[in-house]
Image (cartoon, helix red, strand yellow):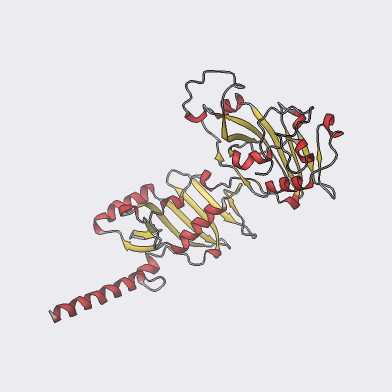
Amino acid sequence: MGKTLVYIVLLAVLGTGVYYFLFRENNGLYAEKEANFTIRDTSAVGKIFLVETDGRSVLLERDADNNWTLNKKYPAMRIQVLNILACLRTQTAMMPASEKEHDRVVKLLAGMGTKVEIYDRKGKKIRSFFVGGQGPNYHGSYMILENGSQPYLVEIPNFEGYLTPVYTTDTAEWRSRLVFRVPAADLQSVSISYPSEPLNSFTLDNSGSEPRVILAPELQASFTDLNKVRVKQYMDFFAEVNAEGYLNGAIGMDTIIRDTRLRCKLSVASKKGGTTTLDIYWKNLTDHGRDLSDQTSTDPTRRPTDVERYYAVNQASHDTLLIQALSFEKMFRFGYEFYQKEGENRMNANPAPVNNKKAPINYVQ
């Protein structure tokens, strides 16, 4: 019994030593040549290139101000970039693919894997590897270094899941959904025009020493005392606003937009330069497969509309966006509201010249 215990202890020590030798980063033979998928100092990363065998690719590049661009054209989504950097910093080779799985895994990596190339800020390649599918029980993903012979199961310690989705080449997943990022101090102007309610349109002009709200000519003389509290609140709404997603290329989207009512035109200008103008449309409830078979009207002015989302078209980039009412509805104010006293809202204010067809809501949201 004593000898058996000694053998067990010796085997455990030897096993630990072998594992330590093979996998300890920057020391073990395999860690250096075959299993080093970790980049501890991700602050040194300047470029990430992802490409699949079908040609789809994503290029992420960091500028001197630590901002990331996508495919040399669009701002990259910050949270997605932080996610891949965190993955590179913590992912660890746990074990080689088993002898039984070796050939199958290598074949899948070669045929369907995503190649990942990591470069430093000077453009020098510091790592290159292929990412394949998930490991057993959806834990970790199989990876192999470029020119490597041994695939490994790579995981993030204490993370339940696999890593393949982090290395997606779907550009829509990487592109920033930012619509406005204009702090109040940088806001030059905001203009909203309502085609069905022109008297409620307005422009907030912040180009002078004090902001002012310009109403329709028919109304301006009737409103003189600007509510500066409301103006300040409104200017803060544009500090950071995101869309829910892009609808570019969606089947039938052009037809849907053409047959949908225009909610308003919203234009936001920054003192630092640049103006973003959106054409915002009501979203019919029948869009995208919602079952409203009892709604038979073909008149777009009578169709029920989605209270949670709108469509928007960016006039400059021609992107079609899906936006949330939660983010944008608070911007759709009527000009006269900026001249109301605190506590007044659309329900108890009834200036006769204003064509207010929309159900009243409170100002602060």
Left or right side of 126 for 198: right
Residue 311, quarter of picture:
top right
Q: Is the residue 124 above or below the residue 229 in the image?
A: below
Image quarter of the N terminus: bottom left
Q: Observer-nearest residue: 33 or 322?
A: 322
Q: Is residue 311 visible?
A: yes
Residue 54 position within the rendered picture, expressed as x and y whole percent measured from the top left: 43, 43
Residue 74 position within the rendered picture, expressed as x and y whole percent measured from the top left: 60, 47
Residue 16, quarter of picture:
bottom left
How many labels were placed on the picture?
0
Residue 7 position within the rendered picture, expressed as x and y whole percent measured from the top left: 18, 78
Residue extending furthest toward the right: 221
Residue 108 position within the rendered picture, expressed as x and y whole percent measured from the top left: 34, 49
Residue drawn at the location 48% of the way across and 47% of the way down: 169
Residue drawn at the location 75% of the way across and 48% of the way down: 232
Left or right side of 142 for 13: left
Residue extending furthest toward the left: 1
Q: Is the residue 60 above or below the residue 260 in the image?
A: below
Image quarter of the C terminus: top right
Residue 21, quarter of picture:
bottom left
